[in-house]
Amino acid sequence: MNQELENQLKQDAKTIQAQAAARLADPAFSAQLVTLLSEQPHSRHRLKQRSWLFGMAAVISLTVLVWMGLQTPESTPVAPSFVVSRTLDFNLKQVPQSVEAKINQPLVQEQQAIMADLKALKEQLLSI
Amino acid sequence: MTEQQLITQAQQGATNCFTQLVASYQARLYSYLLARCQNSQDADDVLQETFISAFKYLKSYDAQWQFSTWLFTIARRILSKIKTVYHLTIDAIAGHEHITEEDPFALDQHNIWHIIKQDLQPSSYDVMWFFYVEQSSIKEIAHIMNQSESWVKTNLHRSKMKLSNNAALELMLEGE
């Protein structure tokens, strides 16, 4: 039974294969498939071809961003207590000194005012 | 040009090379689909979809498997989707068993592959086709079916046992 079954399966498969061949022999049928294939974008290949464009675009974007970041904005009067520099082009040694000077300025002025008052009081006391 | 060279060229976008591959395999693939599908129109659709998918995802082809194995794997996946849609649509519209128009390329009702379709699940039918007609190895069949090799062997054995118990089939074979 098994051998007969196997033989019959193979024999009848040949009939199906002959049917398939007859169908595929139709030029219109084959042409339709070729047309469909030619219309398909070979997406992965084209993506690879265009990948250098994406890289270029990324480099240009980064360059523009860095250039914009390097542009020093016009300086505006800032409160002595809080000074935030936006520019990357600054003298590292000067920053602490300038910040310190600006923070200490009012304190120094007040100190000088107090010393002046104390001098005046001393003179008044001595004159008594 | 060898098949591997054709595949390599096709992977790089050579459509004419892929067309040659299509010409090499379409007969085998279409035979399987004619046996498997309800009608030749479904077989036509699946054949086209299979080659379009193969062209689209050609770079994912793994050369450790035969090219035919890869094509049959794609075809089975598409076939399962189309059959689902087919049954849902036809049943919803007709409300009863759909009577197809005469299909010149439909399987002959006396063809054993038409007869055993009534007895076997689609997966078992496929295993039988790949083993007896395609003469694929158990390993290749397991890859197509996405199953283990032991599953394939067991499935094959059970299918043969089941068909052996089919009295009508036995009569037909004895009558040959």
Image (cartoon, coloured by chain):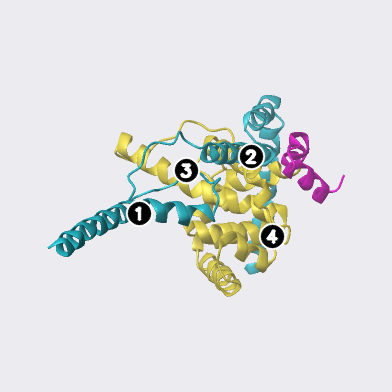
Q: Residue A36's quadrant in the figure?
A: top right
Query: Helix, strand or loop at disc 3?
Result: helix
Tell which circle, 2 or 4, labels the residue nearer the N-terminal end.
4
Q: Are marks 3 and 4 in contact (CB under 8 Å)?
A: no
Of labels 2 and 4, the one closer to you: 2
The residue segment tinted magenta is B1-23
Subunit bearing disc 3: B
Q: Residue B12's quadrant in the figure?
A: top right
Residue A7: assigned label: 4
Residue B82: assigned label: 3
Q: Is residue B164 magenta?
A: no
Residue drawn at (65%, 38%) of the image: A56
Position of A115 with respect to A93 (left or right) is left
Kind of residue sitting beneath label 2:
Leu
Q: Colour of chain A?
A: cyan
**Within 10 Å of the Cα at label 2, are there few (<14), some (14-19), or many (20+) other Cα atoms?**
few
Q: Are marks 2 and 4 in contact (CB under 8 Å)?
A: no
User: Do dots 2 and 3 share one subunit?
Assistant: no
Residue A103: assigned label: 1
Q: Are marks 4 and 1 in contact (CB under 8 Å)?
A: no
Quadrant for the N terminus of chain A in the image: bottom right
Tell which circle, 4 or 1, labels the residue nearer the N-terminal end.
4
Kind of residue sitting beneath label 3:
Ile
Query: Helix, strand or loop at disc 4?
Result: helix
Kind of residue sitting beneath label 1:
Ile
Location of mark 2 (residue):
A47
Kind of residue sitting beneath label 4:
Asn
Mark 2 → mark 3, Cα distance in angstroms: 29 Å
**Within 10 Å of the Cα at label 3, are there few (<14), some (14-19), or many (20+) other Cα atoms?**
some
